[in-house]
Amino acid sequence: MAELQVVVLAGGVGAARFLGGLVETKGNDSDITVISNTADDIRLFGLQVCPDLDSVMYGLGGVESSDRGWGRENETFNTLEELRAYKAEPEWFQLGDRDIATHLIRTQMLDAGYSLSQVTQALCKRWEIPATLIPMTNERVETHVVVDDPETDHVKAIHFQEWWVRYRASLPAREFLTIGADVAKPAPGVLGAIGSADVIILPPSNPVVSINPILNVPGIRQALRLANAPIVGVSPIIGGEVVRGMADKCLAAINVAATASGIAAYYGPRSGDGLLDAWIVDELDETSVKEISQLGIKTVATKTLMSEPGVSKKLAETVLELANQVTKAKDA
Ligand code: FO1
């Protein structure tokens, strides 16, 4: 039997955890392509840091820090201490010693003329990850957040990482700008993977700053809309609350309710001008199933809290089962 072609759009820790479950359930008889957000990327101390690519790489490599949700396990911070002793800016972002090695190699290869896709492929070789990880684009795209400067009260745009890490999303966001996206091209392999997929998954990632930048790269949203494969999403909300991070602050800025149904409506049904064929909500949000189904999105409720053992595998099974049902219904 031909391998199942699975495409996952990824950003951050929720995607990395989901992918762990997907590999557990389908690792040997599927071909998984992960298209990662790169708009969180930032150059610091001369190093190109790619948080979402690294979350997936470390997560599937089994070396991520599960406490922090980013960076490496068994990490030390000696270089950071030295940088701080020199009063090197910025002081609000932490880089671990092991993690720095990844950024050093990435930056060296980029500066030597390799594309981000080529560099990512080279880095992933070390970890033997059971998926193909590709950046959404090889061009520079960054999320900037428009805020009122707390010092001057003037409006200014700051890098997403400064808003997220330095200010813990406490400055009300007026707008999110995906700088560079309008002139970016999808990285090689992105459109082909979407076109030949059997299943496309939006894992429980932040819709505004993780998934939206991917959709903003010209050609990607359209390829998703035209794909033969069903698109199944997982809600990042549990019991009416964001699971981790500060996604509610991002959603508020674009006037989307931080609820399972608010986010489903934001992505929209594929039968309209949106993306979703199916949507999985947490069992605590079961009351929203009817309302979301009425939008034309096949919806089921199940356990989605992936810090509990076995849940990510079960969730991945539910996603694949739902995709299968959508495909069968379409073919009937
Ligand atoms: N998140 C933090 O809250 N504080 C940090 O100092 C920090 C450093 C960091 C370094 C490398 C990396 O790959 C990720 C890092 N993150 C840190 C996580 C990152 O800010 C994000 O959570 C995302 O970009 C959102 O997905």
Image (cartoon, grey):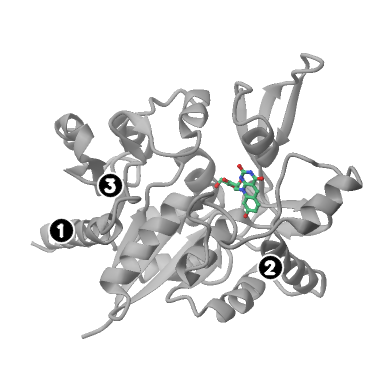
Residue 20 position (above or below residue 236): below
Above/below status of 269 relative to 132? above
Residue 112, placed above or below residue 138: below
Residue closest to the far right: 86
Q: Residue at x 26, y 55 (%)?
A: 311
Q: What mark, if any, has residue 304 been given in the picture? A: 3
Question: Horizontal placement of 39 versus 254: left or right?
Answer: right
Mark 3: secondary structure: loop
Q: Locate residue 325, reporting x and y percent.
A: 13, 58
Q: Given the image, on which type of amino acid does mark 2 rest?
A: Thr
Rendering quarter of residue 122: bottom right
Please identify the residue farthest to the left as the structure is shown: 332
With 145 as the anchor, is 194 left or right in this view? Answer: left
SS at circle 1: helix
The residue positioned 71% from the left and 54% from the top of the image is: 95
Disc number lying in front (1 or 3): 3
Q: Position of residue 254 (x, y in %)?
A: 50, 26
Of labels 2 and 3, earlier in sequence is 2
Please, is residue 133 above or below residue 217 in the view? below
Check disc 1 and give the amino acid type.
Answer: Lys
Instruction: Between label 1 and label 2, give the one nearer the viewer.
Output: 2
| Residue at point 43%, 69% (across, down) | 33
What residue type is disc 3 on? Thr
* Position of residue 77 measured from the top left corner of the image (x, y, whole percent): 72, 55
Q: Are marks 1 and 3 in contact (CB under 8 Å)?
A: no
Query: Can you tell which mark lies on residue 330?
Result: 1
- Residues at marks 1 and 2 touching, judged by CB atoms closer than 8 Å: no
Residue closest to the far top: 153
Mark 2 surroundings: few (<14), some (14-19) or many (≥20) residues within 10 A: some
Which residue position holds label 2? 102
